[in-house]
Image: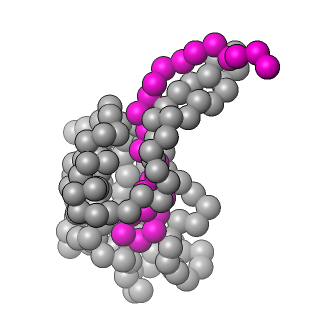
Amino acid sequence: MFDRNPLVPELIVTRLGASLAFWIEQLGFAIAYQRAEEGFAYLDLNGAQIMLEQYGPEAGQWLTAPLQPPFGRGINLQIDVPAVAPILQRLAQIGWPLFRDVEDAWYRAGDVEAGQRQFIVQDPDGYLVRLVQRLGERPVEQA
């Protein structure tokens, strides 16, 4: 049995096959386990975990409002990866558009800045996924 994280988002998706192709083939996740008959998959990428569940109008899913694309408005999922370059290359090979281009960003965290190379892409249902490569820390520059 593998270790499950204490917090794992579960995304309702319109077509599980299309979502699995994106999350696995493009972002590099692997299926930890799935229940194909229920339209469900639990995915893992170096400890980053996410669950995908195919929408079914009679499935009794926990929905607070009707689903309208793009899904996940107001949320982006940040996922740490060893390097963003291989993912960017896979996305470019199939012509998948980026929502936000790759950038190096530094965020103040107390007396240091934490750096990350990042970009944002939308999955097939419009969920925002921010892939992050850690760049380390540096002292906060005084203005």
The span shown in magenta is 120-143
Q: Quadrant of the C terminus?
A: top right
Tell me: residue 132, above or below residue 61: above
Of all residues shown, which one is farthest toward the bottom? Answer: 58
Report if residue 141 lies within the magenta region: yes
Horizontally, is 105 left or right of 2 in the view? right
Going 26% across and 70% down the picture, which residue do you hit?
18
Q: Can you see residue 33?
A: no
Residue 22 appears in which quarter of the rendering? Answer: bottom left
Residue 59 appears in which quarter of the rendering? Answer: bottom left
Horizontally, is 129 left or right of 63 in the view? left
Tell me: residue 111, above or below residue 29: above
Horizontally, is 51 left or right of 72 in the view? left
User: x, y percentage for residue 37?
Assistant: 20, 73
In front of the other: 9 or 96: 96
Q: Can you see residue 15?
A: yes
Tell me: residue 19, above or below residue 118: below
Report if residue 138 lies within the magenta region: yes
Going 28% across and 64% down the picture, which residue do you hit?
95
Q: Quadrant of the N terminus?
A: top left
In front of the other: 132 or 45: 132
Q: Main secondary structure of the magenta part?
A: strand
In front of the other: 97 or 107: 97
User: x, y percentage for residue 109?
Assistant: 66, 24
Going 47% across and 59% down the picture, which residue do you hit?
99
